[in-house]
C-alpha cells in the first residue's frame, strides 16, 4: 500500500461541502454504500459519498463519463449489492476511486460539471441498506485489552485464555439479523441464570450491551482448500465499516459454555452503511509489533508487511443517547474513545488465519474485528467493561460470584 495523490490532504473538490472543516466525506475518503431516495421505491444502487452528497453510480455509469476498467467498475456498482464490484479486485477498486477523484477535483468542461451534478443525490434525502449480499459473517476476538477486562470477570485468577496470544479466535455469527445504522433492535427474550439461583428463568434481557468493532468486507475470496497468505491478505479486503455487535450479557453468560455465543448475539448486528476502502485508509497504517516477552506469531501469521504497516490507527468513539437524555434535553454522552491500532491481531492475520485450514472466503463476506478496547479505562469498548461493578453473571457451571472489573 503506497501513498498517492488521492491521499494528499491539500487537494479539494469543486463541491464546497466536501472541503468544510470536519466534513466526514472529503475528496480523500470516497467511501461506498448502497442507497436510494427516501420513500421513493427506487431500486437500491451503489453510491460514493462526497461532502453532503452521494454520487449515484448507476446514473454515472449511464452518463458515460468513465472509460475502461473504471466504467466497468461503476457498472458493477449500479446493482443493489456490491458483490460483483468486490469480486473485481484491487485494480478495479483503485481505477474507480481515481476516476471519481479526478471528476470531483476538477471537471474538464461546463457540460461535464452539469452531467456530474445530475448524478448527485443529497445525503439528507437518502436511505441505505446492507451494501453487499453477505454470505457469511465471522466475529473475531482480537483485543487483548477487551479479553483481559472480560476475562477478569469470569476467571480472575487466569483472565487470558491459553490460546489468545497464539490464535486469532472467532465464532461464526448470524447474517440474517445484520442491519445498517438506524436498525431498530427489539430487546431479546431468553434464558438467564441469576446469582444464587438453582434454575434459569425466561424473560427479557436485563443486560443489553454494545461492542464497538470494525467490520471487514472481503473482496476477492479464495478457492476452498487453498489458503490466503498473510502477505497477500490485505489485497483480498475491499474495505472497512463500523460494526456494533449487540450483546445480551445475561443470556450470553448462561448459554455460552461450551460452544460459545448463540442467542446472546444473534438477534442483531448493526453496521454503518459506508465502507471506507483499504486504499483510503493507507495514511492511517502503522507498524505492528509484539512485545519481546510475548509469544511471536507462528510463521503463517508473520510477515515483514504486517510488521511494517499492519496496524491501522482508526479512531473510534462510543456515544449513548437514551430516552432520559432526550427528556432532559441533554445531548448524547460520550462513553469511551479508542483506536484500532491496539488490536492484538491485524486484518491480514485474521484473513490468513480464517483460510489456513482451507475455508473459502467469498466476495461480500463480513468479518467483525471483535470488540476494540484500548489499554486505559476510558478506552473500553463495552458497557460490561465500563461498569465498575458487575454482579449478575454466572458463566456455565461456575459458582456465582460478585466481581469487580479490574480497569
Ligand atoms: Ca463481538
Image: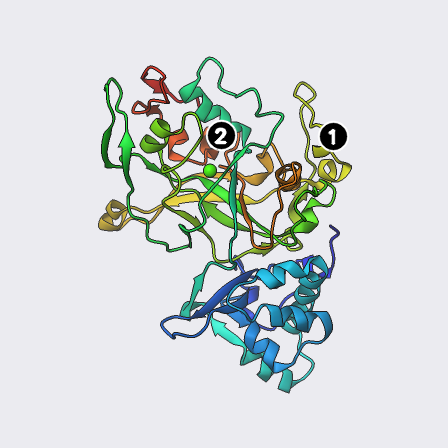
Q: In front here: 275 or 75? A: 75
Q: Image height check: is 219 above or below 314?
A: below
Q: Is residue 341 visible?
A: yes
Numbered circle sitting on residue 36:
none
Of label 1 and label 2, which has the lower sequence position? 2
Residue placed farthest to the top in the image?
157
In the image, taking residue 129 as reference, residue 388 lies left or right, namely left
Q: Image height check: is 39 above or below 152?
A: below
Numbered circle sitting on residue 299:
1
Question: Which residue is identified by label 2?
Answer: 146
Q: In front here: 15 or 91? A: 91
Q: Secondary structure at mark 2?
A: helix
What residue is shown at x 23% (from left), y 48% (from top)? 328
What percent of the width, then of the height, locates residue 175? 45, 49
Crowding at dot 2, Cα within 10 Å, few <14 / some 14-19 / many 20+, comes out as: many
Crowding at dot 1, Cα within 10 Å, few <14 / some 14-19 / many 20+, comes out as: few
What residue is shown at x 54% (from left), y 67% (from top)? 46
Q: Is residue 282 visible?
A: no
**Which quarter of the image is occupied by the C terminus?**
top left
In the image, taking residue 14 as reference, residue 302 lies left or right, namely right
Residue placed farthest to the front in the image?
225
Amino acid at each position: 500500500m503506497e501513498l498517492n495523490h488521492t491521499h494528499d490532504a491539500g487537494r479539494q473538490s469543486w463541491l464546497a461541502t466536501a472541503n468544510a472543516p470536519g466534513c466526514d466525506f472529503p475528496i480523500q475518503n470516497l467511501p461506498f454504500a448502497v442507497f436510494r431516495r427516501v420513500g421513493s421505491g427506487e431500486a437500491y444502487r451503489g453510491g460514493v459519498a462526497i461532502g453532503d452528497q452521494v454520487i449515484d453510480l448507476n446514473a454515472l455509469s449511464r452518463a458515460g463519463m468513465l472509460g475502461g476498467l473504471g466504467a466497468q467498475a461503476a457498472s458493477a456498482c449500479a446493482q443493489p449489492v456490491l458483490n460483483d464490484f468486490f469480486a473485481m479486485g484491487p485494480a478495479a477498486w483503485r481505477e474507480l476511486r481515481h476516476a471519481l477523484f479526478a471528476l470531483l477535483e476538477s471537471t474538464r468542461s461546463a457540460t461535464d460539471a452539469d452531467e456530474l451534478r445530475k448524478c448527485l443525490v443529497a445525503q439528507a434525502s437518502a436511505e441505505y441498506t446492507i451494501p453487499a449480499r453477505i454470505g457469511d459473517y465471522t466475529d473475531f476476538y482480537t483485543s487483548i485489552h477487551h479479553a483481559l477486562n472480560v476475562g477478569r470477570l469470569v476467571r480472575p485468577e487466569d483472565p487470558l485464555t491459553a490460546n489468545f496470544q497464539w490464535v486469532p479466535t472467532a465464532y461464526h455469527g448470524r447474517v440474517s439479523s445484520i442491519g445498517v445504522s438506524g436498525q431498530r433492535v427489539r430487546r431479546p427474550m431468553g434464558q438467564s441464570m441469576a446469582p444464587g439461583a438453582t434454575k434459569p428463568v425466561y424473560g427479557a434481557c436485563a443486560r443489553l450491551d454494545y461492542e464497538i468493532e470494525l467490520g471487514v468486507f472481503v473482496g476477492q475470496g479464495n478457492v476452498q482448500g487453498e489458503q490466503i497468505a498473510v502477505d497477500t491478505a490485505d489485497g483480498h479486503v475491499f474495505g472497512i465499516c463500523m460494526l456494533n455487535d449487540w450483546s445480551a450479557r445475561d443470556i450470553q453468560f448462561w448459554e455460552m459454555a461450551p460452544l460459545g455465543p448463540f442467542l446472546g448475539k444473534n438477534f442483531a448486528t448493526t453496521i454503518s452503511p459506508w465502507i471506507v476502502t483499504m486504499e483510503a485508509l493507507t495514511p492511517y497504517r502503522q507498524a505492528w509489533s509484539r512485545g519481546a516477552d510475548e509469544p511471536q506469531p507462528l510463521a503463517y501469521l508473520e510477515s515483514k508487511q504486517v510488521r511494517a504497516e499492519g496496524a491501522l490507527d482508526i479512531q473510534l468513539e462510543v456515544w449513548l443517547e437514551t430516552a432520559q437524555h432526550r427528556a432532559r434535553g441533554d445531548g448524547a454522552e460520550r462513553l469511551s474513545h479508542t483506536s484500532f491500532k491496539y488490536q492484538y491481531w491485524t486484518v491480514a492475520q485474521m484473513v490468513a488465519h480464517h483460510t489456513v485450514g482451507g475455508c473459502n472466503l467469498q466476495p461480500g463476506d463480513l468479518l467483525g474485528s471483535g470488540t476494540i478496547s484500548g489499554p486505559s479505562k476510558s478506552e473500553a469498548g463495552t458497557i460490561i467493561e465500563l461498569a465498575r461493578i458487575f454482579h449478575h453473571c454466572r458463566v456455565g457451571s461456575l459458582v456465582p460470584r460478585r466481581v469487580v472489573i479490574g480497569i
